[in-house]
Amino acid sequence: MEVSIENTGGLGRRMTIQVPAERLDGEVKSRLQSMLGSVRLDGFRPGKVPLKVVEQKFGKQVQLEVMEQLVNSTLQEALTREGIRPVAAPNIEPKAHEPGEPLEYTAIFEVYPEIEGDIQYGFSIKRPVVEVGQDDIDGMLDNLRRQRATWNTVQRAAGQGDQVTISFEGTVDGAAFQGNKAEDVPLVLGSGSMIPGFEEQLEGVSAGDEKTIDVTFPADYPSSEVAGKVARFNVRVASVAEAVLPELNDEFAAAFGVTDGGIDALTKEVTGNMQRELKGLISSRLKSQVFEGLLEKNPVEVPQSLVESEVMEMQGMQQYQGKSPAELTADAGKRVKLGVIVSEVARQNQVQLDAEKVREMVELIAASYERPEEVVQWYYGNQDKLAAVQSSVIEQQVVEWIVEHSGIAVTDEKMTFTEIVEEAKKSQG
């Protein structure tokens, strides 16, 4: 078998394979001979049909079948022999075949990128130093109280945290737009439920007031009809109400499913949840910085076919909804590059997937469900879901290795729990 390889630019390859005629003819003849015992033709007893007749009757069909099988088998032989890893199944271009001539075809594909030399780590990161304090815990409990708040109507001007019941109608350039009006809408001032600037202009209104306010829709607003445009709203205020928060007692704890241990048990559970959240936020912040550093210091070319495949997968993810095709492609390219670099870091430094850490992450995910043990079983019975967890774990192991062993500059940065939470919200939004 003769193999020649042409670099078509970047990661593209064109591999031409020529299979000797003797191999093709020998396999065709062997296949025809194996048929002799089973072929039935009029005028011949079973098992007594001459080879020449079988060849005349089935030769072309058998040759096509053998050629297809030879393409599949010799392609794998050639790839293995040359040490080549295609990104996806190659496109096959067959050449016209004449009797007695070698079987020849061309395979076109992209190969996985290779990083030459050692991974470069010449960057610095900041490691958050954060503690969950009593003020943070009290603030979280207050948030829970607000979720269970009741509302008492008041005869005063509205302020932050108050609920106003309003009706409104808006126009852009004097014309109505989809969703421009509503009746008797309860709105908590400061909740961020409306577009920026809307709630702030309602501070100080009282029941019975009418007010005209101008706001600008964000440039990335989902509706292109109003995105980036100034809207004028005529607002009527029906009522103003203030929140009445429930007391922190055993009854309050029971409302959140904590029936044993009362408010002390709820506080302990809230504290544990906050500490787990903090651990994840610190891990995510370190990962983000490490990955940005790796991308900057280790440029790598990635196969377009992998990027296109990644785009298709990302289109079904919530965090990528609303992004343009160009933005999706850029993000996909970044994800693929990171995948290549992270794999190389793991290979060069013998970072092996830790099965115990995989189990810990699955159990952490499952802890937020009513029947966590069933969720754990479901993950271990679903290979795709488990693979996603394994990928996340090996990424985290690589980040930990880099932080501890690569020699990058790591400086501690003191932050509050609120600061790191708000920073995470901004990065996601």
Image: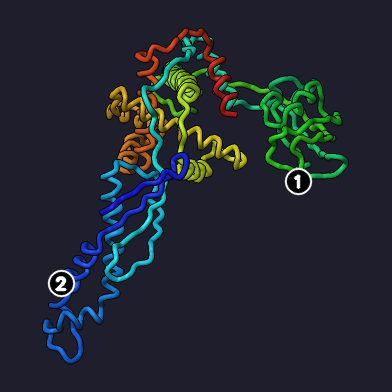
Up the image or down, 302 lies above or below 158; here it is below
State left or right for residue 218 relative to residue 3: right
**Residue 178, disc:** 1
The amino acid at mark 2 is Ser
Residue 253 location (% of width, % of height): 47, 23
Secondary structure under the numbered disc 2 in the rendered image: helix
Would residue 197 be visible to someone looking at this image?
A: yes
Residue 25 location (% of width, % of height): 22, 67
Q: Residues within 10 Å of mark 2 (few under 14, many from 20)?
A: few
- The quadrant the N terminus occupies is bottom left
Up the image or down, 168 lies above or below 148; here it is below
Q: CA distance from mark 2 to mark 1?
A: 73 Å
Earlier-in-chain disc, 2 versus 1: 2
The amino acid at mark 1 is Gln
Q: Closer to us: mark 2 or mark 1?
A: 2
Residue 46 location (% of width, % of height): 13, 84
> Which image quadrant is residue 235 in?
top right
Up the image or down, 44 lies above or below 263; here it is below
> Which image quadrant is residue 198 in?
top right
Up the image or down, 281 lies above or below 316; here it is above
- The quadrant the C terminus occupies is top right
Query: How was the colour assigned to the protein in this rendering?
Result: rainbow
Q: Nearer the viewer, residue 349 or 22?
A: 22
State left or right for residue 326 relative to residue 155: left
> Which image quadrant is residue 223 in?
top right
Residue 40 location (% of width, % of height): 18, 84
**Residue 34, disc:** 2
Query: Residue reaching furthest right?
Result: 174
State left or right for residue 45 relative to residue 183: left
Q: Nearer the viewer, residue 62 or 336?
A: 62
